[in-house]
Amino acid sequence: MKHRLAIFEKYFIYFFMYSVFGWLYEVFLEVVIYQWGFSNRGFLFGPYTPVYGFGALLFIVFLYQIKKNRIYIGKINIAPIVIFFGAAMIATVVELITSYALELVTTEKLWDYTAYAFNFQGRIALNPSIRFGLGGIIFLYVLQPLFEKIVALLSPKKLHFTFVLLGSMMLIDLVFKLFQIIS
């Protein structure tokens, strides 16, 4: 049982790290690329965007073994291509479901891709899907090995403490956001 809890805690910390990374990515796009100025790009108050955390966990569950095992056509490793398309597909489905869920909860659309070519109801579009595919490659080939090394440095006690701290912070944030929505 302790082993399962430690695995859950480890994956929650990965979720948190990817959520922060996603928030930083969104802010970078908004401030540096589009030059719209700063705004909190997340649904919650803190500097994290949980949809990135969920997407990254799905990448780990469904695509990480492909990276480890590799897929060859002849002598060519096509695993990165499979991961690109898999990540693009997973992230696009997650983004579509999230857009409906957040609109149901908040009664507003939190993003709009209607200006992008090949969009569906402004909720998903080809351009972001391609970026998510590339992001999946970065997540699995660069960030996940780094995050695994960082988390491996934590003793079981520190892992548990970090989990409780980050989990409590996000839970409190979510409760405050829900109270804000219903009032």
Image (cartoon, helix red, strand yellow):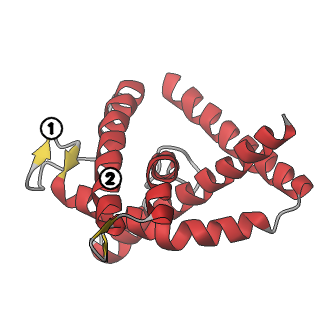
What residue do we see at 28% from left, 48% from top? 89
Location of residue 135 with respect to 35 vertically, above or below: above
Please tell me how many numbered marks the rendered image carries. 2
Q: Which residue position holds label 2?
A: 86
Q: In this view, does 104 lie to the left or right of 160?
A: left
- Foreground: disc 2 or disc 1: 2
For marks 2 and 1, give the CA distance: 22 Å
Ranked by sequence position, the earlier of labels 2 and 1 is 2
Q: Which mark is residue 64?
A: none
Q: Which residue position holds label 1?
A: 121
Measured as percent of width and height from the top left, residue 32 is found at 35, 77
Residue 70 makes an appearance in the image: yes
Q: In this view, does 159 lie to the left or right of 76?
A: right
Question: For the residue carrying disc 1, how many other residues have a C-alpha within 10 Å: few (<14), some (14-19), or many (20+)?
Answer: few
Measured as percent of width and height from the top left, residue 88 is found at 29, 54
Location of residue 70 with respect to 15 vertically, above or below: below
Amino acid type of the residue tagged 1 in the rendering: Gln
Image quadrant of residue 103? top left
Towards the viewer: 26 or 164? 164
